[in-house]
Image (tube, rainbow, N blue to C red):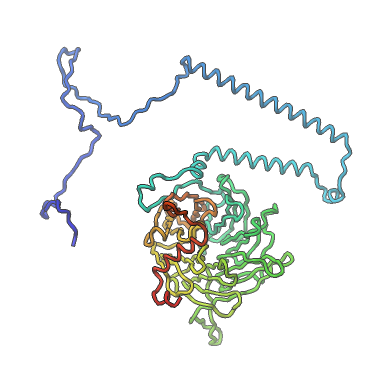
Amino acid sequence: AAVRSPDQLELTEAELKQEIIRTLSADNPHVPRDIVRFNFKERAYKLVDDMDHTAVHFTLNGYLIHKDSDEGRRQSIRSCAEAGSFIWFIYDSYVEELERMEKAKEKEKAKPVAVKKEDQKTGRKLSHIDSLSMVARAAKIAERMVNLNTYDDIAQDFKYFEDASDEYRGQKGTLLPLWKFQYEKTKKLAVTALSWNPKYKDLFAVGYGSYDFMKQGHGMLLLYTLKNPSFPEYSFSSESGVMCLDFHSDHPHVLAVGFYDGHVAIYNLKRASPQPSYKSSKSGKHTEPVWQVKWQKDDMDGNRNFFSVSSDGRIVSWTLVKNELVHMDVIKLSADETTMQGPEGLQLQTLGSGISFDFHKKIDYLFLVGTEEGKIYKCSKSYSSQFLDVFEAHHMAVDTVSWNPFHLKVFISCSSDWTVKIWDHTIKTPLFVYDLATAVGDVAWSPYSSTVFAAVTIDGQAHVFDLNVNKLEPLCSQLVVTRKKNKTTHVQFNPADPVIIVGDERGLITCLKLSPNLRKKPKEKKGQEVKKGPEEEIAKLEKLLSLVRQPGKKEEE
């Protein structure tokens, strides 16, 4: 039954169906309508009809000076004099620098230059290359300074702005849009991967490709910095779409990339080459798109290695040995109870389709794999023929699976079945389930809190959760993409600053700042210091999980 207000009017059906028309006008209802003034032309008192309906709510006295006034002329003369003196100062400095360079050239001509044998063989001109590098460095610094002036208001918001209106929103928060990153050559490509550099906190890599099977073409790999949103720092083109990438944690200039055609490659940012330093061979590459790559610790011989997962059902380990990528299949995902009719009546077992994976932060051999069938496999590097556990996680493809950066047992997953789920890997059922009413493209844990995570959905929205504040719904759900028929694809937290980056299907990356309510810290009690650190983050999440775990499971533990 509907709840009625005690002072609500009781109306009949006829009164409810009656239409009442209200006409809105710009007339001020408080203007007096009986003003009479003496008309000297007609020599009679007349009623005034054209009253001013303007209502002034705010006025502010200005400080502008007319340019033709005495003070205006005085100030213009003073500014011209200062500008003229500054121009002459620049000219004098330029002349002095020119004289100094001419003297230096005369001294170099007088001395015989000793050229090394190596330089004679390669024909390298040291002075020319050095001067070019110096000019390039100076041009990059000048470009960043110009951009800093152009986007000064955004830079100020990034560093200092804190949304004071959060105090009146209760638990809710907002995302403040900052910079937008877009490159002319990537407007028709989708953002397929995002990754922050582990050393340079303002630098991030973006992979461009297409998720549409019918619209496959070239791809691009760009690296942007927050210091220069107008143009990428590095740019690489590829024949196939880039689907995933990952920075090496110990070597931040090394980048592993996976492509739609099944190849994997390693890019070295220190080398000025448009091509990857190393690329997989045709014999060892995946036969389906590579959906994710992850660097691992160097092997016993000190060789760098990373893992890749693909739709062909193979988890492959790639090791860089003597300038060559050597591959080894770690696990082949088998789809349970699915067989295919082969020639002469043979029953062929079909392979599962890997979409995402993540390695445990502490236990080296343990990792999770999300599949296109909606299952999550808990695997070990030591066992190639069997899984440690299988989670019936989702009804559609598991787009992302990620371990919590603090708690050793917890991981999160998202899927196109509209849900985000939080799991304890020792329990087969999810601890938290969130239905976002549309397909979820990506989910990411925050680096500063064990209970904060963000998700993006294909309707263009970004959602930020904090389990410690509200376990039932997001603290913020905000539209990030404004264009129709555009979808958000990926989200990543900055490792140092309170910002996230969100990519979409039109090649646009948007940087947004979290308001204070989305990064709340524990309140300080009188006489007690607030404890900080990983242990406190683990304890905070464990306290929440203990409330939702099964009672029987809790007693066993």
Q: State left or right for residue 296 relative to residue 323.
A: left
Spot occupied by residue 526 in the image (x, y as percentages of width and height): 42, 51
Rendered-image quadrant of the N terminus:
bottom left
Which residue corresponds to the image point at 60% horizontal and 63% vertical from the top-left?
258
Q: State left or right for residue 263 relative to residue 427.
A: right
Spot occupied by residue 217 in the image (x, y as percentages of width and height): 57, 59
- Residue 482 shows up from this direction: no
Which residue corresponds to the image point at 70% horizontal and 52% vertical from the top-left?
272
Residue furthest to the front in view is 527
Spot occupied by residue 5 in the image (x, y as percentages of width and height): 17, 54
- Residue 549 shows up from this direction: yes
Which of the 4 quarters of the picture holds residue 284?
bottom right
Above or below, comparing residue 44 to residue 404 in the picture: above
Which of the 4 quarters of the picture holds residue 162?
top left
Spot occupied by residue 239 in the image (x, y as percentages of width and height): 62, 59
Q: State left or right for residue 537 relative to residue 87.
A: left
Q: State left or right for residue 7 relative to residue 122.
A: left
Q: How many marks?
A: 0
Which residue corresponds to the image point at 42% horizontal and 69% vertical from the top-left?
546
Q: Of 457 and 392, which appears nearest the observer?
A: 392
